[in-house]
Image (tube, rainbow, N blue to C red):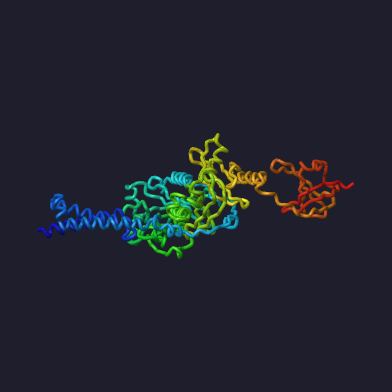
């Protein structure tokens, strides 16, 4: 009878442990803190059950060999965990932590190409969520059953900056009624054109975070890879638009729990659940996010603050650099790079530079460019429209005329973008505001010249001359200025005469013989002087 009771209790304990594992999904890995706490908890439960079953008093617990053994096991596990944590920390491994990330010095003008604004992401994640919710609201056949998930991963898709997110079941009841067919679509938002699409799938997404049982993506990955310690999952699509979950696998390089980087990456087809693991340096190039932005920030902070050891990072803080609070993303060479500013640990409103880090490979470059912090640039942009009470989004770093420039969207209280701002990084008092991106860019470029940051290139074109009768003459207005366009016999070229510079041009007509001095242009020749031949 006693044996049966013991077996029953043992089975109950195993079932409880199994339920705990099914719900919390700890990795079976010595580097996982969850594993250690799972073991500690299991021993505590056994000890508590033993004490209750024996109805032991404190004195009896101290005298019991079994109780003492269990308590000793608990203490041993706890001591090993604490010692392992200390030996894995930057306190005793400052040099190792500082070398986790390799940082190269970069040249901004060479590394960050000037791109057309039709490929610049104009929206942030919050605005993308608003567009996604609006799109869902227009889909009357789906809106009652599904909602847009709040993932909105930023990726490069066919050389366009795009955010993608799957739909999710609207409730537990909606999961029950729809889970056999899965989630029928995902949302894709072009961050430059603001075009929002609901991409319907031939076969529904069966594996997602909104599933409740074995098809829950976290549970599915854990059962496939019980020893892997996963980082933050992201949702991406391949070049054919097939949805995948990208699961980075943590690698601990220092002691038991320290020096986290990414060693592998698991790709899980969101429709079929098929998984494939890759070493991080062999991962397909179409994936854009193996390293999370937060992990890259932590690694750079180790690099910047631990150059002279741990104590210096806390006390003297000589030569210590850290990232600013916030980050954004740049699309370079078909990869997504995380951008953030870099300042001294005692810095206030100024950056000493900024860093770019590849989210697929961890390749990192540092650019020594003194200038305003992102927060200061945001305040500067908001100050230009303070009467409208617009809020600035976190800046995007661009190369305009080889000048590091913050691009900022200004939003109203409803979260909609109303204006755009360009702020010079090194001279953040130079701020251009526009209702459109092109208007903002034009205003900014004018400010660069008028403030002496950029100099107008010397015109080395040769001054030419032509004499002949006017064959055709036409008037036009460009940017509010009147121009006359002439064609002269003996030439197929078109000559541009600004009326503001040569008012007498209005006296001329077809058939009159004139002499023009001009410089050749791309589409029209620029007239420098006009004389009538008498």
The percent position of residue 374, horizontal first and vertical second, equals 52, 46
Q: Residue furthest front?
A: 316
Say which of 463 and 31 sits in front. Answer: 31
Q: Residue furthest top?
A: 387
User: Is residue 417 shown left or right of residue 274?
Assistant: right
Q: Is residue 289 above or below residue 418?
A: below
Say which of 371 and 182 sits in front. Answer: 371
The percent position of residue 399, horizontal first and vertical second, equals 59, 52
Q: Residue at x 52, y 42 (%)?
A: 392
Q: Residue at x 57, y 51 (%)?
A: 369
Q: Residue furthest left?
A: 1
Instruction: Please tell me in which quadrant of the rendered image residue 80 appears.
Output: bottom left
- Asked if one can make out residue 35 in the rendered structure from this viewpoint, the answer is no
The percent position of residue 71, horizontal first and vertical second, equals 21, 55
Say which of 417 and 445 sits in front. Answer: 445
Q: Residue at x 83, y 43 (%)?
A: 508
Q: How many marks?
A: 0
The percent position of residue 176, horizontal first and vertical second, equals 32, 50
- Viewport quadrant of the N terminus: bottom left
User: Is residue 425 shown left or right of residue 490?
Assistant: left
- Asked if one can make out residue 181 in the rendered structure from this viewpoint, the answer is yes
User: Is residue 247 shown left or right of residue 5?
Assistant: right
């Amino acid at each position: 009878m006693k044996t049966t009771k013991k077996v029953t209790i043992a089975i109950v304990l195993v079932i409880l442990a199994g339920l705990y594992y099914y719900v919390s999904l700890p990795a079976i890995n010595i580097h996982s803190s969850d594993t250690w706490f799972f073991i500690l908890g299991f021993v505590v439960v056994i000890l508590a059950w033993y004490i209750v079953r024996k109805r032991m008093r404190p004195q009896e617990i101290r005298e019991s060999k079994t109780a003492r053994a269990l308590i000793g096991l608990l203490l041993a596990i706890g001591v090993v965990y604490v010692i392992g944590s200390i030996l894995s920390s930057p306190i005793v491994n400052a040099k190792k932590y500082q070398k986790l990330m390799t940082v190269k010095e970069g040249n901004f003008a060479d590394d960050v190409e000037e791109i057309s604004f039709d490929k610049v992401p104009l929206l942030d994640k919050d605005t993308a969520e608003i567009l996604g919710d609006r799109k869902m609201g227009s889909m009357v056949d789906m809106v009652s059953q599904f909602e847009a998930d709040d993932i909105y991963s930023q990726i490069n898709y066919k050389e366009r900056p795009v955010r993608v997110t799957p739909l999710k079941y609207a409730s537990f009841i909606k999961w029950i009624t729809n889970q056999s067919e899965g989630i029928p679509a995902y949302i894709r938002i072009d961050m430059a054109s603001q075009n929002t699409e609901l991409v319907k799938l031939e076969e529904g997404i069966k594996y997602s975070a909104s599933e409740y049982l074995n098809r829950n993506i976290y549970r599915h990955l854990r059962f496939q890879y019980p020893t892997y310690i996963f980082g933050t999952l992201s949702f991406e699509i391949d070049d054919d638009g097939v949805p995948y979950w990208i699961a980075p696998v943590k690698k601990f390089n220092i002691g038991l729990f320290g020096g986290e980087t990414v060693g592998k990456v698991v790709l899980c087809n969101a429709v079929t659940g098929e998984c494939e693991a890759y070493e991080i340096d062999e991962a397909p190039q179409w994936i854009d996010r193996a390293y999370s932005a937060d992990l890259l920030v932590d690694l750079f902070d180790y690099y910047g603050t631990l150059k002279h050891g741990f104590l210096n990072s806390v006390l003297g803080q000589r030569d210590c650099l850290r990232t600013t609070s916030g980050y954004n993303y740049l699309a370079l060479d078909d990869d997504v790079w995380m951008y953030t500013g870099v300042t001294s640990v005692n810095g206030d409103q100024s950056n000493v530079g900024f860093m770019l880090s590849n989210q697929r490979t961890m390749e990192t470059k540092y650019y020594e460019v003194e200038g305003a912090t992102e927060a200061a640039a945001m305040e500067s942009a908001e100050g230009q429209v303070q009467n409208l009470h617009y809020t600035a989004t976190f800046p995007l770093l661009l190369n305009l005329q080889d000048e590091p420039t913050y691009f900022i969207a200004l939003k109203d209280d409803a979260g909609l973008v109303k204006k755009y701002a360009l702020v010079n990084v090194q001279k953040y008092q130079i701020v251009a505001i526009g209702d459109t991106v092109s208007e903002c860019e034009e205003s900014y470029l004018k400010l660069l010249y008028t403030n002496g940051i950029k100099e107008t290139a010397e015109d080395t074109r040769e001054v030419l001359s032509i004499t002949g009768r006017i064959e055709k003459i036409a008037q036009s207005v460009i940017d509010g200025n009147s121009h006359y366009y002439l064609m002269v016999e003996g030439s197929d070229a078109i000559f541009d005469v600004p009326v503001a510079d040569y008012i007498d041009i209005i006296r001329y007509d077809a058939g009159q013989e004139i002499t023009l001095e001009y410089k050749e242009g791309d589409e029209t020749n620029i007239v420098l002087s006009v004389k009538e031949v008498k």
